[in-house]
Image (tube, helix red, strand yellow):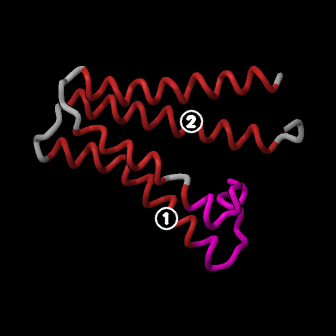
């Protein structure tokens, strides 16, 4: 598959995720759901700091304490991306529709990251 096609697809998926994030706020005239966007910034940080900027260590079984810490922090911040909209809905700060739009946005973002991980495993990059 052409590298430009893969990059265009990843860019489209990421843009769609961010658009849904903004729509969850704008459609319901409530900007509390944007709090989940903070977790989108925090999710890749353990990979950058402890994993050497690569996603390869996430699927490996070997590694020391820093790799395990990176895996834990990545998982905790990913769960926070799901928990924040659910907690905000439970507290009555956002509508149910906004919560489901947030979940859809997160699902598309996770699919984007998985596609990026798969694309970087190929030797063509």
Which residue is at a point 81% across and 26% down the rendered structure image? Answer: 3
93 magenta-colored: no
Viewer-proximal residue among 98 and 39: 39
In this rendered view, identify the residue nearer to me: 112 or 40. 40
Cα–Cα span, label 2 and label 1: 19 Å
Q: Position of residue 70 (x, y in %)?
A: 57, 66
Q: In which quarter of the image is the C terminus?
A: top right
The boundaries of the magenta stretch are 46-68
Mark 2 neighbour density, 10 Å: few (under 14) some (14–19) many (20 or more): some
Residues at discs 2 and 1 in contact (Cβ within 8 Å): no
- The kind of secondary structure element at disc 2 is helix
Residue 87 at x, y percent in the picture: 21, 49
Circle 2 residue:
111
Nearer mark to the viewer, of 2 and 1 = 1
Secondary structure under tag 1 reads helix
Left or right of 123? Residue 106 is left
């Amino acid at each position: 598959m052409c590298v430009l096609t893969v990059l265009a697809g990843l860019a489209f998926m990421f843009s769609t995720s961010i658009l849904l994030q903004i729509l969850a706020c704008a459609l319901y005239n409530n900007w509390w759901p944007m709090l989940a966007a903070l977790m989108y910034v925090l999710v890749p940080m353990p990979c950058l700091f402890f994993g050497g900027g690569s996603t390869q260590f996430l699927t490996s079984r070997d590694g020391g304490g820093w790799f395990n810490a990176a895996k834990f922090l990545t998982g905790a911040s990913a769960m926070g991306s799901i928990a924040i909209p659910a907690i905000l809905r439970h507290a009555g700060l956002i509508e149910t529709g906004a919560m489901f739009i947030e979940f859809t946005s997160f699902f598309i973002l996770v699919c984007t990251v998985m596609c990026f991980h798969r694309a970087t495993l190929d030797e063509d990059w």
